[in-house]
Amino acid sequence: MTKNMNNFFQGKQVLITGGLGFIGSNLARRLGDLGARVLLVDSLIPEYGGNLTNVSGLEHQVRINISDVRDEYSMRYLVQGQDYLFNLAGQTSHMDSMHDPYTDLEINARAQLSILEACRKNNPSIKIVFASTRQIYGKPDYLPVDEQHLLRPVDVNGINKMAGEWYHILYNNVYDIHTCALRLTNTYGPRMRIKDARQTFLGIWIRLVVEGKPFEVWGGEQLRDFTYVDDAVEAMLLAATSDHANGQVFNLGGEAIVSLQELADLLVEVNGGGTYEVRSFPPDRKRIDIGDYYSDYHHIQDLLGWQPQVPLREGLAHTLAFYREHLANYL
Amino acid sequence: MTKNMNNFFQGKQVLITGGLGFIGSNLARRLGDLGARVLLVDSLIPEYGGNLTNVSGLEHQVRINISDVRDEYSMRYLVQGQDYLFNLAGQTSHMDSMHDPYTDLEINARAQLSILEACRKNNPSIKIVFASTRQIYGKPDYLPVDEQHLLRPVDVNGINKMAGEWYHILYNNVYDIHTCALRLTNTYGPRMRIKDARQTFLGIWIRLVVEGKPFEVWGGEQLRDFTYVDDAVEAMLLAATSDHANGQVFNLGGEAIVSLQELADLLVEVNGGGTYEVRSFPPDRKRIDIGDYYSDYHHIQDLLGWQPQVPLREGLAHTLAFYREHLANYL
């Protein structure tokens, strides 16, 4: 990155929703290093990504407030006085969104609206970076997928995230509350949820390979792109610090595009061992299989100078090393 | 229309949400004539379009159930045994959606999800036609706007309608509940709300011109298309009766494309008198002004054989005649 973040966040008040989660906690570490005064909000719902272990060692650099983004009153208070809001709290599980669409709606759509209303009424000069997702595109018409691609979500989660993203853009356009949205693709790295596949299938792969157990690859031919978490964090910081980002939606992307089977092979290789089984898609997943997906990230590259820096092999090595050391805290 | 509807709806059970509203009541009349067994659900919220006068004379042809689509329990019961659901209930006011975004969310998004869940669990063989809106496109990139245009809603209402529409498409794609969505453009005709501009600016124009008072034209240069309500009703019937419609989103369109000032002139001419003032946009509307808009409706024309039949002049004449006779019931 050419941009010098060194002094930008020094002494700034920064709120991170989902701050004990995977990306939130990595962002918190970085912001702590940059001298920001960081407040983490997290509900610690067991099925989601929040984990107090994620901020171990940071106890003196960040404050933690346990609450739920659906709690309008606590959010109304917590947004006050903040310079930046990294709005990362969300329900990420496809399956959970189909089994309980209302909870997904409350978290991914309604709570986003109430956070924005809280900012509009109590802190309109805040800058907000919203974590959106490539899931809202659905099955691509063309590759790589850029921001001009139609949104055709294939699950309830995608629809609600789409609404949540657009509330942010709307509040920028109508109320001049500076916001932008990053459509994250498959993000991976230390502190991701590996207990199960709720956050990403790669989580459970990593857990099983570290445990010395076989993991399952569904399909295998599908192409995907993967962003190492440090690169995603860098994109968020760039988006926060640039007025060019206001009202914009940006795809993130990966340093490499690989098939799931290539990824599985690489994971086993970097791990120095492991086995996996290739299985055909379960019928209920087959219906919403999006085939190949990878992002065009020229927009954020052109406007903010971001591009992924960490090669997939290196990112997987960092990740495996982390979980070999900390596995017990993530089960 | 080439399709013969005469026997299609005979004896069929049809539920219309928003059934006492503008389009719902016109649809109910047509379905009554076609021999359907029609159940109208409406909340009669004063600010919305429901009006018992809309079904006067129909008392022996339709049943009326006063309830709110947000009421999951009543909807769960009411969808049972229905062959068709015309899902028209909605909050339509831009301004109301900005002042009270939560109510708009509850009606236009959450209630749609609960209606679909009710159908999935209790009546998965129902066919659903959802009334969506061209508002979800926002400011056009090109004209005419087809279904490949990006959705970039400019108000809370548009975001929630977008979510509501996509829940319908999702439930078709994932659960095989046959649904489709019609993106209505400016629909007008007898039984529209004319008390104020909550449903469409044309409503208040018609009221004022019938009352012999001047009306206001904001801007005036913007191009729009207008669908007479009988044409919109025909599109809904075609969509309901064709399996080709399942999972599809269709624009409706107008027989003519006119500027607002041309429309105002035509209204005055057809009315045989009247005056209007051209005003510049109020600042809060200017920000979300979408400029020119008109739809490309080739998709529904090609797939279902629909096209608007009623010329604008004729439609306005019918509408004015209706309100000259029934004005008192709509104030």
Image (cartoon, coloured by chain):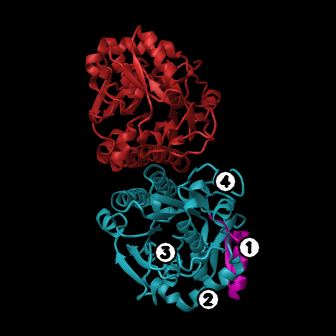
Chain colours: A cyan, B red
Q: Nearer the viewer, mark 1 or mark 2?
A: 2
Residue B3 lies in the magenta stretch: no
* CA gap, disc 3 and disc 2: 20 Å
**Discs 4/3, front:** 3
Q: Please tell me how crowded label 3 is: few (under 14), some (14-19), or many (20+) other residues with Cα within 10 Å.
A: many
> For numbered disc 4, what is the local secondary structure?
loop
Q: Which one is earlier in the sequence, the residue at label 1 or at label 2?
A: 1
Type of amino acid under label 2 = Ala
**Image quadrant where residue B316 sits:** top left
The residue pinned by badge 2 equals A321
Q: Amino acid at mark 4?
A: Pro
Comparing labels 3 and 1, the label whose residue is closer to the camera: 3
Mark 4 sits on what residue?
A: A140
CA distance for labels 3 and 1: 28 Å
Q: Are marks 1 and 2 on the same chain?
A: yes
Is the same chain shared between marks 2 and 4? yes
Image location of residue A331, percent across then percent down? 48, 83
Occupied quadrant, residue A311 = bottom right
Let me know if marks 4 and 3 both belong to one chain.
Answer: yes
Q: Which residues are magenta?
A: A252-279
> Which residue is pictured at 69% across the width and 75% down the height?
A309
Tell me: A292 left or right of A49. right
Residue nearest the viewer, comparing A283 with B99: B99
- Measured in 3D between alpha carbons, the distance from the residue under mark 4 to the one under mark 3, in whole angstroms, is 28 Å
- Residue at label 1? A262
Amino acid type, mark 1: Glu
The amino acid at mark 3 is Gly
Closer to the chain start, of discs 3 and 2, is 3
Badge 3 is on which residue? A24
Measuring 66% from the left and 80% from the top, which residue is drawn there?
A: A315
